[in-house]
Amino acid sequence: MALVLKIAGAVILFSVIALCLAITIVPRFLDRIYYEGPASDHFDGARFFNPGGDDDTFRMPTGSGSRAGFFWRYLTGSDGRPPWPASVPVTQGKPEPRVEGERMVATWIGHATVLIQTQGLNILTDPIWSERTGPFVFGPKRVTAPGVAFEDLPKIDLILVSHNHYDHLDKPTLKRLWERDHPTIVTSLGNDTVIDSVGAKATALDWGQKLAIRPGVEVIVARNHHWGSRWFTDRNRALWSAFVVKLPSGGNIFFAGDTGFGDGKWPAEAAALGPIRLAMIPIGAFRFVPGQMDSGSHIGPANAVRVFDRLGAGHAIPIHWGTYRLSYEARDTPPTMLTTLMRCTGGDVERFAPATVGKPTEIAPWSAPAKRPDESLIDACLKRPEIAALD
């Protein structure tokens, strides 16, 4: 019986892998039109693109071999990747119902999901409570439980959805939040079509457009460097973005979403909208072959330090690591590398330090960091033995 189950499992796995590989090559019927509108400097009338170029988001990692071989090794876990734990202990928090006035409290839920409470608003970024992320429930399994149980979430007023990848636009979670709270959902062009499919309503905006939430509070959709797809063939039919939440005092909130470095100019564009009190910057899923320090779609710790510096942020929380296994690096490599780089470049480590899942963090009003990381030292710091030794 055990042998039969093992063979059946292998057949199912092979079928799923074959389907995923076939989708990347053949069927046009999986294409979707999420948005129709006039051409712009980042939309050609059919698909969106990064103004600085998209080669880096298409290119296979150096040393990865053929595209089919890379995906086979990635999907089967046969690429020599270091082990991850099956689960990690989490002490779930119970947030306050509201945080009024200028006071700000941020709680990392996991992955790119953060609860920010300030000005009497409860804000969620890219919410995902699902056990798996991916189509047909075959995606990566959650390793770190949500830092707050869904039932303990306070009423959510505002949700920011950065793009349509499954680990950021999680339809089951959005459906639950919509049915419970009817929050304002803000996303970038085309993603509202996906969100609408679960009965929720979202406001979709282009880069640079804004939505007033209440007097003194508005959301601005900002540029970053990524791509979008739900079915491979629908690549870049919907836009990706970062967000700035402008607040009446104390400094703004910046959520980078999911991003590569690109031309490196977009952090300054966000900073130009006002001082950033709290930034949420991704640091994980950057390594797809041994030794890789960055990918076109995902910044690693090195470029995260550059983004932090260019934002001029008062405080930053590193996100997009340790929850779902999406890449090659060990689970603790991103935060360990980040702390080492901040220290090596002379930055204030406490201002951009890993958060504990589920633990609320009081965020002070914006003030300029006394010690900023020296970007000119980053490449040399990456050669340090303690960084080179990280899997």
Image (spheres, rainbow, N blue to C red):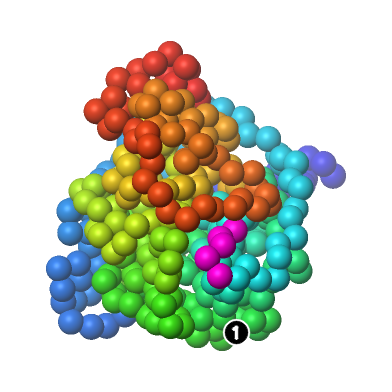
- Residue closest to the eye, 230 or 153: 153
Magenta segment: 101-105
Quadrant in the picture for the N terminus: top right
- Does residue 27 appear to the left or right of 86 in the view shown? left
Q: In the image, is residue 209 above or below residue 78?
A: below
Q: Amino acid at mark 1?
A: His
Q: Note whether residue 148 is visible.
A: yes
Q: Which residue: 47% across, 69% down?
A: 160
Give the x, y percent position of residue 256: 39, 56
Quarter of the view holding residue 121: bottom right
State the SS at label 1: loop
- Residue closest to the eye, 268 or 276: 276
- Does residue 83 appear to the left or right of 205 in the view shown? right
Q: In the image, is residue 277 above or below residue 382?
A: below
Give the x, y percent position of residue 313: 38, 49
Q: Which residue: 71% across, 58% down?
A: 148
- Residue closest to the eye, 306 or 17: 306
Residue for badge 1: 182
Give the x, y percent position of residue 306: 31, 40
Residue 102 part of the magenta segment: yes
Residue that sits furthest to the right in the current view: 1
